């Protein structure tokens, strides 16, 4: 741990609502570009970096960290602007800037190379980070990553990018807690699998000023970011990659998986039947098994 880091031992119950006496991870904070960035740390072995999706945070991986840390040193980040990391004013929210910050985090915590697991928009960040520093990424694991071939949500992105609509969204969002529940239900293939405390966990950081503004900032460069990502994919075609998708994904089309797979020379696609956009939460045991088997196979 560097001199700029602070460690806070946190019980798993404090993050997931599951009452356990022994901690499953350490909560840490490190300095990044003059701001404080939070992450969860657990395990020993090769580094495995977990990158959450749009407006998510390390809470997303609460069912995965205890298992994956048996075979890796896990770093689950709260990217700047979300979760319980700082929200610096004027933060560049573009995909390339987010990926570059992630690499500076990797430098700051002393990681030479890592396996990189990203989901949704965090999957796009992971791919761009790999393109910026391909020698530092051993393998990619991408859970329903945002990609240029999925049309889901593009109309909503266009709508929220309108200045008046975006302003109205920021004004109404704090009053729309029932809407949070509706969005969460749509992200699951079967809403009966939503575990207790999930809505509360995702909603907690929304009380921190700047969270929603950060989300809109990401959407402003969405189209340009996807164009840059498509152009960057040839630079990471050689990296062994695992794609995991739910067949009922309503956020990032499972139909786009094959187009993305074709951009890699060594890529396995796993389609989880009946599962939605959050396979690591909706079916964590199966997800952990799939990822664990991939990590157990030597890269190459």
Image (cartoon, rainbow, N blue to C red):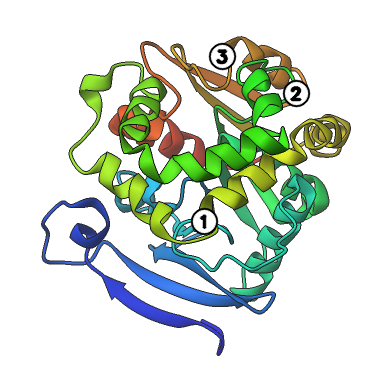
Q: Tell me the CA gap for discs 2 and 1.
A: 24 Å
| Residue 139, image quadrant | top right
Q: Secondary structure at mark 3?
A: helix
Front in this rendered view, residue 71 or 62: 62
Residue under the image location 41 percent in, 24 percent down: 187
The residue labelled by disc 2 is 148
On screen, residue 7 versus residue 156, left or right, reads left
Coordinates of residue 18 in the picture (x, y in percent): 15, 51
Q: Are marks 3 and 2 in contact (CB under 8 Å)?
A: no
Front in this rendered view, residue 42 or 200: 200
Q: How many marks on residues?
A: 3
Residue under the image location 39 percent in, 80 percent down: 7
The residue labelled by disc 3 is 254
Coordinates of residue 73 in the picture (x, y in percent): 45, 61
Q: Secondary structure at mark 2?
A: loop
Badge 2: few (under 14), some or many (20 or more) residues near its Cα, within 10 Å?
some
Dot 2 or dot 1: first in sequence order is 1
């Amino acid at each position: 741990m560097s001199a700029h880091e602070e460690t806070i031992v946190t019980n798993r119950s404090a993050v997931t609502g599951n009452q356990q006496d022994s901690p499953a991870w350490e909560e840490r904070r490190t300095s990044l570009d003059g701001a404080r960035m939070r992450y969860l740390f657990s395990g020993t072995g090769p580094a495995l970096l977990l990158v959450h999706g749009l407006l998510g945070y390390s809470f997303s991986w609460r069912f995965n960290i205890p298992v994956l840390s048996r075979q890796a040193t896990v770093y689950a980040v709260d990217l700047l602007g979300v979760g319980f990391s700082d929200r610096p004013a004027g933060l560049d929210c573009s995909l390339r800037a987010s990926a570059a910050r992630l690499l500076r985090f990797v430098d700051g915590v002393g990681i030479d190379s890592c396996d990189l697991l990203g989901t949704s928009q965090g999957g796009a960040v992971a791919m761009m980070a790999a393109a910026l520093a391909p020698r530092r990424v051993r393998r990619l694991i991408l859970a329903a990553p945002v990609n240029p071939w999925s049309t889901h949500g593009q109309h909503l992105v266009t709508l929220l990018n309108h200045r008046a609509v975006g302003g109205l969204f920021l004004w109404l969002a704090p009053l729309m807690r029932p809407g949070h529940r509706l969005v969460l239900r749509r992200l699951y293939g079967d809403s009966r699998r939503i575990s207790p405390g999930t809505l509360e966990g995702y909603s907690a950081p929304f009380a921190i000023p700047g969270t929603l503004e950060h989300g809109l900032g990401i959407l402003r460069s969405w189209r340009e970011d996807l164009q840059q990502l498509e152009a960057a994919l040839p630079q990471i075609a050689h990296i062994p990659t695992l794609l995991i998708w739910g067949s009922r994904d309503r956020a990032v089309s499972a139909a786009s998986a094959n187009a993305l797979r074709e951009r890699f020379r060594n890529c396995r696609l796993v389609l989880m039947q009946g599962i939605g956009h959050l396979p690591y939460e909706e079916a964590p045991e199966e997800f952990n098994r799939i990822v664990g088997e991939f990590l157990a196979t030597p890269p190459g």
